Image (tube, rainbow, N blue to C red):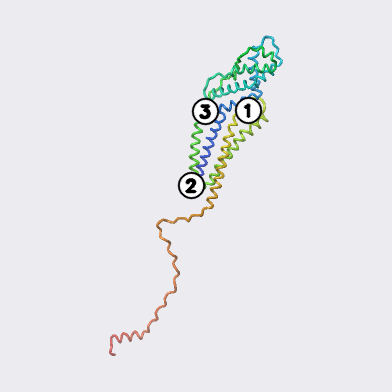
Amino acid sequence: MSRLRRSAGASLVGLGLLAATIAWSALVVRVTVLDADRLADSAEELLGAEEVRDAVAGNLEDEIAPLLPAGTETPGFDDATDATIEDPQFVAAFSSALVTLHENVFAGSDAPLVLDSGAVGAASTNGLASVDPALAAQVPPGTRLDVPLTTVDPPDLSWVTTVVTLVMILGAVAAVGLLASGLATTPHRAVTLRRIGRFALVLAAVQLLVAVVVPSLLLLVLGSGWPEVGIRTWRAFAWGLVIPAMVLTVVGGGCVLGARALRRTTRSEPAAPSPGRVGSPPPAPAPSPAGPAPAAAPSRPAGSERERIRDWVWPDS
């Protein structure tokens, strides 16, 4: 019976850890890829990538050049464009456009993917002024520039949000139920609790590795071109894993310490005697060895017996 309980408890805990892994993976997607604020925070990070910077600079130049008088020489035009991209107003406009892009992809929105024209116009004027104030003076005040974020229609992946949320909720409920059942079934609760704690600690370590170490290493190896854009985007998203990893570390450490305390408590308790069958009579005492047989009474001589019979038949003889 104990072996059956141990096997059932281990199976329930294994299924519970599998469900927990699925639910936690859905949570990771929820707090990273599906979090629009993470993408917004990555605006400055993305503008540091050469490919993104060149694409944005080209769009800016196409919008600014027609504003200048014909024949105007712009020897420092590239410097002015770089200054415009680094302007806080432009970064804020780019960040807002990234949020709109995220909503178009994961929320089914159809808002236009264009940077705030007023903010871009003001940032462009400031960028020109930092290079050549006379050149900036030729730009009409209050200029608004419509700079597109992308010319490609983004895909509609709004269904992903629904599926991820459903998997996260169902997986969490299944994990709690299975792990609780496994702990209640197994006779080795300390070992099972330690197993759960170690699983949480390993998962937390993997998250921190993916969030902090891996992007930095990939930037050293693939630090150019569009791979750089993807790595920078993931690094911005992956910071959402830090707090969940810290929570997992606390939970895993608590489970390991709880397992040690439970083991010490179990060892200190005296072993209870095994209960006998209710109502059974006490065991009979072992029979004592048989003693020597009693000695037979000495037999009376045959003559005395004849005399007794003769006296009974002939009493006067």
Alpha-carbon distance for marks 1 and 3? Answer: 23 Å
Corner quadrant of residue 288: bottom left
- Position in image of residue 168 (x %, y %): 51, 33
Q: Is residue 64 above or below residue 28?
A: above
**Residue 159: which disc?**
none
Q: Residue furthest right?
A: 75
Q: Earlier in the sequence, mark 1 or mark 3?
A: 3
Q: Earlier in the sequence, mark 2 or mark 1?
A: 2
Residue pictured at 53% horizontal, 53% vertical: 268
As shown in the figure, which amino acid type bears the numbered disc 3? Thr
Crowding at dot 2, Cα within 10 Å, few <14 / some 14-19 / many 20+, comes out as some
Quarter the C terminus occupies: bottom left
Residue nearest the viewer, comparing 3 with 76: 76
Crowding at dot 1, Cα within 10 Å, few <14 / some 14-19 / many 20+, comes out as many
Crowding at dot 3, Cα within 10 Å, few <14 / some 14-19 / many 20+, comes out as some
Disc 1 marks which residue?
232
Q: Residue furthest bottom?
A: 317
> Please, what secondary structure does the residue beneath circle 2 have?
helix
- Position in image of residue 182 (x %, y %): 49, 43
Q: Are marks 1 and 3 in contact (CB under 8 Å)?
A: no
**Residue 161: which disc?**
3
Disc 2 marks which residue?
5
Q: Nearer the viewer, mark 2 or mark 1?
A: 1
